[in-house]
Image (spheres, helix red, strand yellow):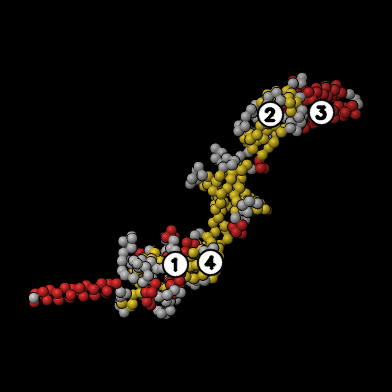
């Protein structure tokens, strides 16, 4: 009988001790004199629990203390975040300092023919094409190389007139009448000028004089070095005077047309240096000069077009209609307080920077931005020199600040955490954490 009573007492003591331990584990604790309000997932502050537990990724939930729930209790602005959490989410800071920024403008350009080096070839007389020396587009030609032979009755007649004028001039060379000699000379010069005006070269005229008979066809030559970009004639075709037959483009220099955004225009001037890189030749940079800024914007893209003149390579690496990457170094330098561009949270309506106040306190602050260059952005208003700004994981800290503000407007955490069966999340609408902005 006594043995039964002893066993019952022992069982009762074990049951009371276990219940006490369970109660201690489930109730909010006081650590170092601070009262624990609840525990939360270190990677997602929206998920909380009334008891310690592990997150799905294996990390321990971190405690949120009573004095950390309001910003003013510690005599500091902003919110306090546990040092373990700060380390786990990879918070990095940088001092706000004065920087000298040189703006670099990058744009996409298209290689184009230099319009000042395009030559249109045509004949000034009517005739028929007897022979083509250039019978396809893309062929390179040198200045003075033959392009075609033309039969023109008008040219044949003029050659005969020129030969007759020469014979008449020779007969009157011994005349005692100076007026007759002068008339013969003027007739020769007039006929010769007509041939020259029809682009018959001087050497062809000299050959005509030495030959003494008219030539059925006349050869016409290229007006410049370049590439035949267009061919509008075939052998045997009848052509009229002024009709365009070839286009020859000199590609020794080309234009690269780059589209620049409106806000970048103050940093661009005529005469500035630019660098051009072709996509099929990565790492090879060619220097150019801005020769013109177009006076109007493109109607569709609302960008300004800038013309960069580039000297081509002997192999004609810059071919018309190629895409190129353009880098323009602005001569204008900007000096002022600047922070890394990645440190700014841009919501569309606000620009927010997270400032590290020290001792685990952080503050989300609205800032006014200036010029951006070299990966930094000038701060016009909102920060002071020497302050520490968060450059990594600032989205999580800002979300935590918004969460604290939302929870302050709700009932106490202990009341809201009694309803869920597992106690894993706070009821009500909470801000969602965008983990893509983590790092």
The part of the image, by quadrant, that contains residue 131 is top right
User: Neighbour class for label 1 at 10 Å: few (<14), some, many (≥20)?
Assistant: some
Q: Is residue 99 visible?
A: no
Label placed on residue 65 = none
Which quarter of the rendering shows the N terminus? Answer: bottom left
Which quarter of the rendering shows the C terminus? Answer: bottom left
Determine whether, in the image, residue 47 is placed left or right of residue 129. Answer: left
Rounded to the nearest angstrom, the CA distance separating label 4 from label 1 is 21 Å
Label placed on residue 191 = 3
- Name which of mark 3 and mark 2 comes first in the sequence: 3
Residue 187: % across, % down: 85, 28
Dot in front, 2 or 4: 4
Return the residue at label 2. Answer: 233
Residue 346: % across, % down: 51, 63
Report the front residue among 405 and 234: 405
Label placed on residue 350 = 4
Residue 118 versus residue 11 in the image, above or below:
above
């Amino acid at each position: 009988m006594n043995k039964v009573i002893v066993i019952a007492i022992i069982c009762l003591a074990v049951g009371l001790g276990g219940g006490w331990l369970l109660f201690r584990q489930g109730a909010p604790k006081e650590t170092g004199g601070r009262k624990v309000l609840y525990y939360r997932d270190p990677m997602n502050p929206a998920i909380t629990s009334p008891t310690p537990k592990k997150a799905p990724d294996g990390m321990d939930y971190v405690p949120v203390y009573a004095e950390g729930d309001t910003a003013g209790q510690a005599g500091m602005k902003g919110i306090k975040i546990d040092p373990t959490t700060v380390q786990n989410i990879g918070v990095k800071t940088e001092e706000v300092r004065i920087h000298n920024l040189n703006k670099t403008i990058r744009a996409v350009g298209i290689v184009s023919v230099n319009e000042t080096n395009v030559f249109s070839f045509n004949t000034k007389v009517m005739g028929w094409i007897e022979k083509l020396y250039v019978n396809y587009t893309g062929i390179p030609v040198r200045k003075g190389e033959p392009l075609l032979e033309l039969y023109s009755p008008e040219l044949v007649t003029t050659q005969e007139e020129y030969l007759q004028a020469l014979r008449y001039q020779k007969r009157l060379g011994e005349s005692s009448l100076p007026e007759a000699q002068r008339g013969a000379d003027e007739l020769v010069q007039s006929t010769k000028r007509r041939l020259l005006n029809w682009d018959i070269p001087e050497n062809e005229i000299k050959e005509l004089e030495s030959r003494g008979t008219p030539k059925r066809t006349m050869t016409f030559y290229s007006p410049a070095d370049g590439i035949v970009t267009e061919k509008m004639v075939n052998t045997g075709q009848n052509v009229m005077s002024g009709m365009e037959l070839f286009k020859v483009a000199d590609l020794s220099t080309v234009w690269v047309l780059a589209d620049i955004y409106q806000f970048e225009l103050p940093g661009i001037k005529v005469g500035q240096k630019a660098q051009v890189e072709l996509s099929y030749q990565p790492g090879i940079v060619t220097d150019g000069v801005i020769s013109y800024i177009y006076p109007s914007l493109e109607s569709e893209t609302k960008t300004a077009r800038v013309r960069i003149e580039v000297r081509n390579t002997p192999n004609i690496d810059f071919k018309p209609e190629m895409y190129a990457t353009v880098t323009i170094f602005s001569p204008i330098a900007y000096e002022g307080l600047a922070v890394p561009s990645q440190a700014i949270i841009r919501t569309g309506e606000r620009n927010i920077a997270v400032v590290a106040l020290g001792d685990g306190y952080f503050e989300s602050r609205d800032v006014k931005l200036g010029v951006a260059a070299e990966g930094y952005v000038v701060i016009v208003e909102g920060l002071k020199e020497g302050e520490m700004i968060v450059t990594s994981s600032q989205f999580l800290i800002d979300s935590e600040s918004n969460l604290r503000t939302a929870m302050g407007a709700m009932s106490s955490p202990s009341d809201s955490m009694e309803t869920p069966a597992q106690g894993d999340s706070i009821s009500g609408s909470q801000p969602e954490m965008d983990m893509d902005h983590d790092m």
